[in-house]
Amino acid sequence: MGLKQKLHRLKEKYKGTKMAPAFNALHTFLYLPNETTHGGTHVKAADDLKRTMNIVIMALVPCLIFGMFNAGYQHYLALGEINAVSGGFFSSEFWTMSNFSVGAWKILPLVAISYGVGLGIEFLFAVIKGHEVEEGYLVTGMLVPLIVPVDIPLWMLVVAVAFGVVIGKEVFGGTGMNILNPALTIRAFLFFAYPTWMSGDKVWVHGAVERAGTPDAISGETILGSLAQNKAFEYDTMDMLFGFIPGSVGETSTLLIILGALILIFTKIGSWRIMLSSIIGALVMGYLFNVVAELGWISESSKFYSLMSIEFWKHLLIGGLAFGIVYMATDPVTASQTNKGKWFYGFLIGFISVMIRVFNPAYPEGVMLAILLMNVFAPTIDHYVLQGNIKRRAKRLKVKTA
């Protein structure tokens, strides 16, 4: 008897019991439904929530694989055992098994913990509350390991994932009911509960924490961290575009994030309006800061000067801004739902992200806080957009009937 038949028998055996949602979830995740509809009119489409989530995961896989290579590369580079890559994105100095093995050894446990703990809690709540298991955590489970430092202790991730799933989703009713992006809720918990493991110059490169304070200590300060302290950084534009820089696991390669954005836009899963307006908002804020720096309104010795004076478009290549815009700002549950609202929502995310970067040197990455803030205001934006449409229609009707 095949696995499909066994799962189907278990599904039928436990039908109507508390364990039914668990077997239903496994069956629908692996196979198409067994039921065939008869009569009437039905909408025939290949997409459903499960396949939508799977497409987002596929768009994230290139960032995950690159992150594994980059984790090993940054580790060996900081130790001085290899030289900086030359030859661009397809350099043989980067795509080596030694780099990949180090990265996979550190990152795959993060993926396993994220899915194991998160789905375990989802299944538990489904059994207790008697509802079906939603597929929403499939994407969250992949996002979480991509937005944390490579050396974060696993027990911290366990606590954070449990907090994010229970407080960020289940207390609101599960997938489709949460008001905050679950992955960012998990990262926010980590940042405020364990700040020393989420910032500084020792957490972004594997081995830096263990070697801190020793003669051969290595540092992995990010570009944003350097700029926040008015330090110069040694990475050129192509390094930042390709992703040969320290940072969270999946946020470094802007090139692969653009590829993921194209996949989401082409499949109509991610909103191009939110992505484009977020980019515009970030560029506008960055350009305004450039003007302030060029006019000399701020001293070069100021702690804000470096982040203000960096070319405005480079804000899209450093930190997690691009990753947040593409994969988290476009979350259909927590983002604005109206087309006009998406323009305001996205613009403010980009605008506020760069503002936080510049004015908060202790936390020179604002996209997480900007998205969470706009998640809260998304319903308000949609409300005023709808009210504006209603008033305009009422005014037109009044003119016609006059």
Image (cartoon, rainbow, N blue to C red):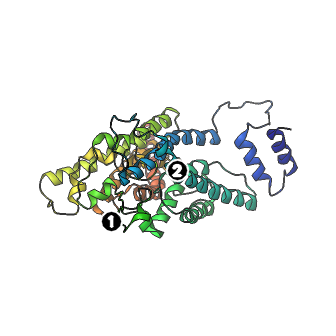
> Which label sits on residue 362?
1
* On screen, residue 59 above or below 136: above
Using the rendered image of the protein, determine whether residue 264 is visible from the camera's viewpoint: yes
Question: Within 10 angstroms of label 2, few (less than 14), some, or many (20 or more) residues?
Answer: many
Q: Earlier in the sequence, mark 1 or mark 2?
A: 2
Q: What secondary structure is marked by label 2?
A: helix
Separation of marks 1 and 2 at Cα, in angstroms: 24 Å
Left or right of 268: which side holds 358?
Answer: left
Q: Along the line of sight, which residue is nearer the eye, 95 or 342?
A: 95
Residue 356 screen position, x and y as percent: 33, 59
Query: What residue is drawn where x is 42% and y is 57%?
Result: 368
Image quarter where the N terminus lies is top right
Total marks placed? 2
Q: Give the residue number, with chain letter if any, for mark 2.
A: 143
Q: Secondary structure at mark 1?
A: loop
The answer to the question of whether label 1 and label 2 lie on touching residues, with beta carbons closer than 8 A, is no
Q: Amino acid at mark 1?
A: Ala
Expressed as whole percent of the image width and height from the top left, the position of residue 59 reads 51, 39
Where residue 286 appears, as percent x and y from the top left, is 26, 50
Residue 54's quadrant in the figure? top right
Q: Of all residues shown, which one is farthest toward the left?
A: 296
As rendered, which of 149 and 32 lies closer to the eye?
A: 149
Residue sitting at x 78%, y 49%: 23
Question: Which residue is at the front of the view, 306 or 233?
Answer: 233
Crowdedness near tag 1: few (<14), some (14–19) or many (≥20) residues, C-alpha within 10 Å? few
Q: Nearer the viewer, residue 29 or 292?
A: 29
The residue positioned 64% from the left and 42% from the top of the image is 50
Q: Which x, y percent locates residue 301?
A: 16, 63
Residue 320 appears in view: no
Location of the C terminus by quadrant is top left
Please tell me whether residue 4 is drawn above or below residue 329 in the rendered image: above
Q: Amino acid at mark 2?
A: Leu
